[in-house]
Image (cartoon, grey):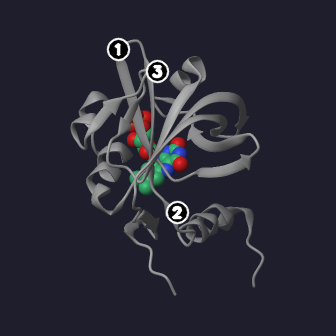
Amino acid sequence: MDIATDADLAQQFRAAMRRLAATVTVVTTREGDEHHGMAATAVTSLSVDPPSLLVCVNQSASMHDIVHRRQAFCINILGQQHGPLCEAFGGKLAGAERFKVGDWAEDDGGLRYLTDAPANIFCVMEQHHRYATHTIFIGRVQRIRLADQSDPLLYYAGGIGRFMPT
Ligand SMILES: Cc1cc2nc3c(=O)[nH]c(=O)nc-3n(C[C@H](O)[C@H](O)[C@H](O)COP(=O)(O)O)c2cc1C
């Protein structure tokens, strides 16, 4: 394998990341009466004791500073039926318009969650770490809603699809 020059590396990195399939989620948070949400695949389990995860959010994303201030967010894992949400929350729609796609409710803490998601994971933000363009938010899990069944919406090579067991 060739060693890339600096000039090539970003392009090759993008190409390599297109080969990293990931489940699509929508991260939600809230400030006052305003709800915010965006599509995110950079979500990773961190530890079971305590239950915790991380999500990487671009510092230019409109919800970035709100997660920072509010210190709470919900990870809504998307299922096969949620392709339109991936588009809407991925930037096709803006602000409150996004929540017109999908069936949303509010938990006791006021965070919006997708009622028919395979799972909703409610977190308090315990730590954050800024790196380059992004911030890693570490969420400590407070509560989980689980659907009986799960057929995840996967993002791969710039498109969405379905998990197929080998
Ligand atoms: C499938 C998919 C996955 C994404 N994953 C992330 C992610 O993990 N982190 C991130 O900061 N943006 C991610 N984005 C981009 C944001 O969802 C998008 O830029 C969004 O419009 C940001 O919200 P804003 O327009 O309100 O700033 C993803 C977009 C898509 C379509």
Assign ligand 1 to one image quadrant.
top left
> Which residue is at 30% across, 49% downward?
85
Q: Which residue is mark 2?
A: 22
The amino acid type, in three-letter code, at marker 1 is Asp
Q: Crowdedness of circle 2 by 10 Å Cα count: few (<14), some, many (20+)? A: some
> SS for tag 2?
strand
> Which residue is at 24% across, 33% downward?
97
Q: Is residue 99 above or below residue 4?
A: above
Q: Which residue is mark 3?
A: 109
Image check: 127 left or right of 35?
right
> SS for tag 1?
loop
Which numbered disc, 2 or 1, marks the residue that appears first in the sequence? Answer: 2
Instruction: Name the quarter where the N terminus is drawn.
Output: bottom right
Between 116 and 16, the one lying in front of the other is: 116
Image check: 161 left or right of 119?
left
Q: Are marks 3 and 2 in contact (CB under 8 Å)?
A: no
Which numbered disc, 3 or 1, marks the residue that appears first in the sequence? Answer: 1
Q: Is residue 45 above or below residue 10?
A: above
Residue 46 image point, x, y percent: 71, 48
> In whole angstroms, how far apart are the C-alphas of marks 3 and 1?
12 Å
> In whole angstroms, how far apart are the C-alphas of marks 2 and 1?
31 Å
Task: Give residue 102's quadrant in the image.
Answer: top left
Between 67 and 73, the one lying in front of the other is: 73
Of the numbered discs in the image, which one, if any, rests on residue 74? Answer: none
Q: Is residue 135 above or below residue 163?
A: above
Residue 128 image point, x, y percent: 70, 31
Task: Give residue 163's quadrant in the image.
Answer: bottom left
Q: Which residue is mark 1?
A: 33
Q: Crowdedness of circle 1 by 10 Å Cα count: few (<14), some, many (20+)? A: few
